């Protein structure tokens, strides 16, 4: 502790130390302190996309997650981040896809009509495809046939006969499930074969009927794309040599990738590098590795050779920085043949000395794009590009490298080996960040499982904000399951924030309307307001601790949601004239700015904004002020017209109130404005999506209609009951004991009271008393009846 005797000042002792940033580093498999090379400057290289197809949810999670970490470092923790990303535009998948698309387009142009030659080519392609895919699933031929003609039996099995067997077996679901397990692409292949086969039958019928139309040809080709592509590539790949064919496909998918990223609000990298633009540097880099003794050139052919990285020479060798080590990220994968082969690509070369070695330079084969090199025409292997571009742009020591967890081995381990072999160091990268896998409803995403979701599809079902929230609710390096219940959680969180912001914006607007210097003579910082202000401070400290704890966004969101619910409790429990809007405004401003910091904001950032913005459709920022104001002004103007009309005609107040209700319930609802009447007579207005207001109004109307219906039914029942009652009084009291109303007596007095029964016997005294009472009651009923008839109530 330092002190200054002149002013008696001492450096304060903090009650709580500021949290230090720790990140989960794949090198240590633990959270470690984050220490960049130059103060607060972070150099970061991220493996970008291989551009040959549409991006999917796995990509979305990877790039959005990195975007979040980048924003936290830069916009919250105050680092300057130099974020470099590459685009892999030279790759076996790109080469094959481009070649197949090109050859298929050429094939279409060559077959404008349905001909028997076209059908024959498709049949050949189909047979070859079946032979390479599902033929192995056909049961062996019976021993008898096999013995009689082995060649014919084999031919049968790999063609027509085999297909019939497979198609029959595939009717059985248990068999299909088993086949899918042993053959991951089973269902895709089965579908491709079945489709093409049906189209071949249809084409044969059309040819027989003399229909050779272009539509028939197109139908056959469309249904046979998979089988034809494979066939054309096998037979004609060598004829494709124009580099533009490969470049065009890569450029198209690169543009699509960045369009997806823009829609997901993923910021573009600080610098973008493309492999195709770095081939000379790659050649030099490989020469450096060769010079250091960690690579060798094979003798594939005199004019073009492959260059291989020698893992065994590298692993354990001494260098100026210490001892080299191979597969530091995933040592358990070292020698995993399947992963190694996948990493080498489908167009892998041959000629390496050890199975663990990998290609630095692949010699060009016919039908592949190539660049000049000391080893003849060829192209870079997959892993070398990242070593070279990262080193070129960021140097021989880099703070952060990132990518999806699936790139850990062999790609990232090979990258590290190459770079450390070149630079003669043992820690080229200090922090390796791997984003976790994404599963869909518990299953790995794959085209054959039909749970493959492209970013385009995801954005048609959810907003970019909802997708980002779903990723933020996960630990960034853990596996996540994209499932319906997660999206329900996302929607709940989203509406908690939306409702809170709408309420504070409305209160804030009202407070502003009273003027900046308005005072009612009270400070409004009562115990509850003070408590909320302290809860804001606690949340701010906790949120910072969460961000520093390996970017713990699930915890961060939980802290913000808890703060919002505390603010809601305060807002609802305080009377309107006691409410401290400033404290609520501070909470909203903080929550909104943290959500925006995480990339969840929509629309332009306005200083002091109390919301995270409304998720709007693209390009809505281009709408001008007049267009926004016009519908509101139109409503105001027509309201004024009607008020004037009513005033001129001395209309009753009821009609004016009716007009005010129509404004609230109809006109403003359509404009997305909710008007809430308050006790003090001043309505509070909120901006709420019109469809939400319409739904609420429909619900109110439904409830009202139901109530009215119940009331009407009750009234009808009461009326029926009264009629029934009145009906009892229709008979005059003097007639009530005489026919046709009664047949039990034979003589009556002047009042119509019976004096003798049917048999002529005199009516007993006691009985006569009862009859008199009965008559008294009828007098009353009859009077009521006559009055009702007089009033027209009954006829
Ligand atoms: Zn890479």
Image (cartoon, helix red, strand yellow):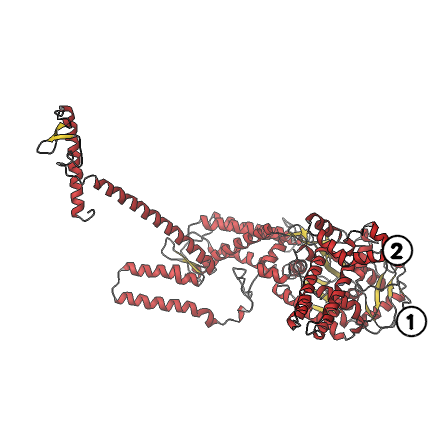
Q: Earlier in the sequence, mark 2 or mark 1?
A: 1
Where does residue 691 sit, x and y in percent of width and height?
47, 59
Where does residue 766 sit, x and y in percent of width and height?
15, 24
Q: Marks 1 and 2: in contact by CB < 8 Å?
A: no
- Residue located 17% across and 48% down the image: 791
Q: Which quarter is ligand 1 in?
A: bottom right
Where does residue 345 sit, x and y in percent of width and height?
79, 62
Where does residue 388 sit, x and y in percent of width and height?
79, 67
Do we see residue 193 in this rendering? yes
Q: Is residue 671 left or right of residue 221?
A: left
Residue 358: mark? none
Quadrant location of residue 447? bottom right
- Residue located 63% across and 59% down the image: 76
Q: Could you say which is closer to the camera, residue 90 or residue 301?
A: 301
Q: Could you say which is closer to the camera, residue 343 or residue 642?
A: 343
Residue to which mark 2 is pinned: 316
Do we see residue 87 in this rendering? no
Quadrant location of residue 308? bottom right
Q: Please tell me whether residue 547 is drawn above or below residue 620 in the rendered image.
A: above
Quadrant location of residue 312? bottom right
Residue to which mark 1 is pinned: 302
Q: Please tell me whether residue 104 is drawn above or below residue 556 in the rendered image.
A: below
Whole-angstrom CA distance, mark 2 to mark 1, is 33 Å
Beta carbon at label 1 within 8 Å of ligand 1: no
Q: Is residue 422 left or right of residue 452?
A: right
In the image, farthest residue toward the left? 750
Label 1 element class: loop
Label 2 element class: loop
Q: Residues within 10 Å of mark 2 (few under 14, many from 20)?
A: few
Beta carbon at label 2 within 8 Å of ligand 1: no
């Amino acid at each position: 502790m330092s002190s200054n005797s002149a002013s008696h000042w001492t450096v304060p002792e903090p009650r709580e130390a500021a949290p230090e940033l720790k990140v989960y580093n794949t090198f240590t498999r633990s959270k470690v302190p984050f220490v960049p090379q130059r103060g607060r400057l972070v150099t970061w290289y991220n493996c970008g996309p291989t551009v040959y197809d549409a991006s999917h949810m796995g990509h979305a999670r990877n790039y959005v997650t990195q975007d979040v970490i980048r924003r936290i470092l830069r916009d919250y923790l105050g680092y300057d981040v130099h974020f470099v990303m590459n685009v892999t535009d030279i790759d076996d998948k790109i080469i094959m896809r481009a070649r197949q698309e090109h050859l298929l387009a050429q094939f279409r142009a060559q077959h404008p009509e349905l001909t028997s030659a076209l059908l024959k080519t498709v049949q050949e392609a189909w047979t070859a495809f079946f032979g390479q895919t599902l033929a192995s699933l056909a049961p062996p031929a019976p021993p008898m046939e096999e013995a009689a003609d082995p060649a014919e039996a084999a031919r049968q099995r790999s063609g027509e006969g085999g297909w019939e067997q497979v198609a029959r077996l595939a009717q059985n679901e248990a068999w299909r499930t088993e086949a899918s397990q042993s053959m991951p692409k089973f269902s895709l292949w089965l579908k491709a074969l079945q489709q093409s086969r049906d189209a071949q039958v249809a084409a044969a019928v059309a040819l027989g009927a003399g229909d050779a139309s272009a539509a028939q040809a197109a139908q056959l080709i469309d249904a046979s794309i998979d089988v034809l592509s494979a066939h054309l590539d096998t037979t004609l790949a060598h004829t494709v040599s124009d580099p533009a064919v490969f470049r065009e496909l890569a450029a198209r998918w690169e543009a699509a990738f960045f369009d997806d990223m823009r829609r997901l609000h993923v910021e573009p990298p600080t610098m973008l590098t493309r492999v195709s633009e770095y081939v000379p540097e790659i050649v030099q880099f490989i020469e450096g590795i060769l010079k250091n003794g960690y690579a060798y050139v094979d003798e594939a052919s005199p004019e073009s050779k492959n260059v291989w990285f020698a893992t065994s020479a590298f692993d354990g060798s001494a260098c100026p920085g210490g001892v080299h080590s191979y597969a530091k990220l995933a040592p358990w994968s070292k020698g995993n043949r399947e992963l190694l082969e996948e990493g080498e690509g489908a167009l892998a070369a041959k000629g390496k000395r050890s199975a663990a070695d990998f290609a630095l330079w692949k010699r060009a084969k016919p039908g592949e794009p190539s660049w000049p090199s000391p080893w003849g025409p060829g192209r870079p292997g997959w892993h070398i590009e990242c070593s070279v571009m990262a080193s070129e742009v960021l140097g021989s020591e880099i703070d952060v490298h990132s990518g999806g967890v699936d790139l850990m081995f062999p790609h990232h381990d090979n990258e590290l080996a190459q770079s450390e072999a070149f630079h003669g160091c043992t820690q080229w990268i200090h922090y390796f960040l791997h984003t976790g896998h994404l599963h869909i409803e518990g299953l790995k995403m794959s085209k054959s499982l039909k749970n493959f979701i492209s970013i385009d599809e995801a954005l048609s079902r959810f907003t970019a904000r909802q997708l980002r929230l779903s990723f933020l609710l996960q630990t960034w390096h853990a596996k996540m399951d994209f499932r319906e219940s997660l999206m329900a959680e996302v929607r709940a969180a989203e509406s908690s924030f939306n409702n809170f912001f709408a309420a504070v914006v409305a209160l804030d607007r009202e407070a502003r309307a009273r003027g900046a210097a308005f005072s009612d003579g009270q400070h409004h910082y009562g115990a509850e307001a003070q408590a909320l202000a302290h809860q804001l401070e606690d949340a701010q400290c906790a949120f910072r601790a969460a961000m520093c704890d390996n970017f713990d966004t699930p915890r961060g969101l939980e802290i913000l949601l808890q703060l919002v619910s505390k603010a809601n409790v305060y807002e609802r429990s305080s009377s309107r004239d006691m409410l401290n809007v400033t404290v609520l405004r501070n909470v909203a401003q903080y929550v909104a700015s943290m959500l925006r910091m995480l990339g969840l904001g929509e629309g332009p950032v306005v200083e002091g904004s109390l919301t995270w913005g409304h998720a709007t459709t693209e390009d809505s920022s281009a709408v001008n002020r007049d267009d926004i104001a016009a519908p509101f002004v139109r409503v105001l103007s027509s309201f004024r017209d009607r008020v004037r009309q009513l005033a001129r005609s001395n209309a009753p107040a009821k009609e004016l109130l009716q007009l005010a209700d129509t404004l609230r319930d109809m006109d403003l609802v359509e404009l997305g404005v909710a008007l809430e009447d308050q006790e003090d007579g001043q309505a509070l207005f909120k901006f709420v999506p019109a469809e939400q207001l319409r739904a609420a109004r429909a619900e109110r109307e439904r409830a009202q209609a139901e109530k009215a219906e119940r009331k009407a039914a009750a009234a009808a029942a009461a009326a029926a009951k009264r009629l029934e009652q009145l009906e009892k009084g229709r008979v005059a009291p003097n007639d009530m004991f005489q026919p046709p109303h009664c047949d039990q007596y034979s003589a009556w007095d002047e009042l119509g009271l019976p004096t003798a029964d049917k048999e002529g016997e005199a009516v007993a005294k006691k009985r006569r008393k009862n009859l008199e009472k009965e008559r008294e009651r009828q007098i009353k009923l009859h009077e009521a009846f006559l009055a009702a008839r007089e009033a027209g109530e009954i006829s």
